[in-house]
Every structure is written in structure tokens, then in C-alpha cells.
Amino acid sequence: MAAYPDGPDGRKMGAKRQRIVDQGPSFYGTPPSASFMYPAPAYGYVSQPPPFPVVRLRGLPFDCTDVDIAEFFRGLDIVDVLLVHKESKFTGEAFCVLGYPLQVDFALQKNRQNMGRRYVEVFRSRRQDYYNAIANQVSGDAQGGSPWRNAPRAKSYDEAKDSAEHTGVLRLRGLPFSAGKDDIMEFFKDFKLSEEGIHMTLNFEGRPTGEAFVEFASAEDSKAAMYKDRMTVGSRYIELFPSSIEDLEEAVSRGR
């Protein structure tokens, strides 16, 4: 899978966890009319995050990859895929985060459809179940160079974020693919940033991944900026993660 240099097994978490790099409907070969099938809902209060669009899959083949799940949900806006492991073995379950709450209903239509020779069950899930699954894998990983490496076992994903060391770098996930550095500077308008300190990541084809790294003036500033976690840019809520210069450089180099 040359398109996914971190490997397809979904075991690596923090900044290095394998995840789907969504490039919009055209990446999966969806016809242009798909944008009318899955419109972005309008939310009147931007300070309130939209319902968390996550589904859980069960009964997956044990050689399943995140690419297989993207193909299974072809035409939907895949933001993240988490393959659930227990004691380093894939359990046959996964979480899939979609671009918009409306898409959950379309994903549920795939319930009991086949992937290979196995039929897959698709359920509605909750934000906390997804976060807890990530926290369990964060606790089980020991990735060198990751700010998650020394985090104690967390009861929730939020606690894992809170316990991560701040180095002055934040990773942003969930950005609109049209977002630019100006949008990020506006998002963090309460902090002093330079355009040179904003790094938009690209995939191997040179397309935006929906992620970015931002360098702040100090670790104190990056920690303070976490209050913006799950606020919105356009109709997309943005997740923030403590990161590091090493992770920033690795992510940027993959898109060159």
C-alpha cells in the first residue's frame, strides 16, 4: 500500500497512528453529483460542535485495512478509521468517523453487507466510545518521538490529551480541504503566529490531508490554545492534539 507509508494495520497512535487520508469524494471515484447527496448541514451556533459522526463496524475480515473500510463506504467523507486491537491482535471491529452527521444514516445502510466473504455489521456509536478506544491504544503504544509516549493510562481520550506534554506545536485535524494558512491564523487570532510556523500537510499526490501543524511562540501558548479544541472552521469541527517538531517534520516530509 504505497499510498499509506505508515502501514495499513492501524496500530500506531498519536501523531503516527495509521489513519485514512481523505481526499474528498473524487479520491474514491465518486461522481460529482455526490456533493448533492451528502450536503454539509448548517448549524446556527458555531460555538456548539455538531453531533459526532461515528459508526462502529463488527465482523470485519482479520486482514482488513483502513483502505478496505474506505472502499466499503465509498462515496462518503472518511475522516478517520480506527482498527481496534487487543493484545496486538485485530479484533474484527473498527470505528469510522465521517465528515458530517448526515452521513451516518448513509453508512448504516451498509449494515450486514459483505466485505469479501464476511458480512459486516454497522452500528451507531458515540464520541466517548471512539475516544476510549483511542485512549486504550495510546496507552498500549510506546512510540519514540511522540508526545503521547510517556502519557499514563488514560480513562478517556480527553485525559490522554490533558496529560500529553506540550512542546509548542499543535496538530490540527478535520480542516476543510479548502482551508489555508489565513483560516488557521484567524482560528488562533488570540495568539501570535507567523505564516512560516503553519504547516499544511499533503499526501503523496500533493493534495491536502485536512491536517496541519502549528508552531506557537511557547509551550505555554500551545497549551492555552487547546481551549479551541472542537471549535469549528466553516461547518467542520477541528480537533487539536499536542505534538512535536519531530512529528511535524515527519508529516511534512511524507508530502514532498
Image: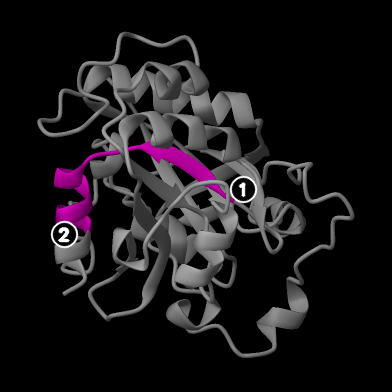
The vertical placement of 5 against 3, above or below, is: above
Residue 77 image-quadrant placement: bottom right
Query: Which residue corresponds to the image point at 27% horizontal and 81% vertical from the top-left?
Result: 205
**210 vs 237: above or below:** below
Location of residue 50 in the rendering, given as x and y in whole percent from the top left corner: 76, 46
Q: Quadrant of the C terminus?
A: bottom left
Q: Give whichever of 168, 97 is nearer the camera.
A: 168
Corner quadrant of residue 137: top left
Left or right of residue 210, residue 232 in this image: right
**Amino acid found under the numbered disc labelled 2:** Pro
Q: Calculate the distance from the C-alpha at mark 2 to the C-alpha at mark 1.
A: 31 Å
Residue 10 in view of the camera: no
Between residue 248 and residue 127, name the one nearer to us.
248
Which of the two labelled residues, at mark 2 and mark 1, occupies the earlier sequence position? 2
Residue 22, quarter of the rendered image: bottom left
Residue at the spot x=24%, y=37% of the render? 12
How crowded pointer 2 is (Cα within 10 Å; few <14, some 14-19, many 20+) is rated as few
Instruction: Look at the image and tell me in which quarter the N terminus lies.
Output: bottom left
User: Callout 1 environment at 10 Å: few (<14), some (14 to 19), or many (20+)?
Assistant: some
The residue sitting at 73% across, 71% down in the picture is 38
Q: Residue furthest bottom?
A: 32
Identify which amino acid the numbered label 1 is placed on.
Answer: Arg
Mark 1: secondary structure: loop
Q: Which residue is mark 1?
A: 112
Q: Label 2, on which residue?
A: 5
The percent coordinates of residue 170 (x first, y second) are 37, 43
Give the magenta part as a residue range. Answer: 238-251
Left or right of 41? Residue 234 is: left
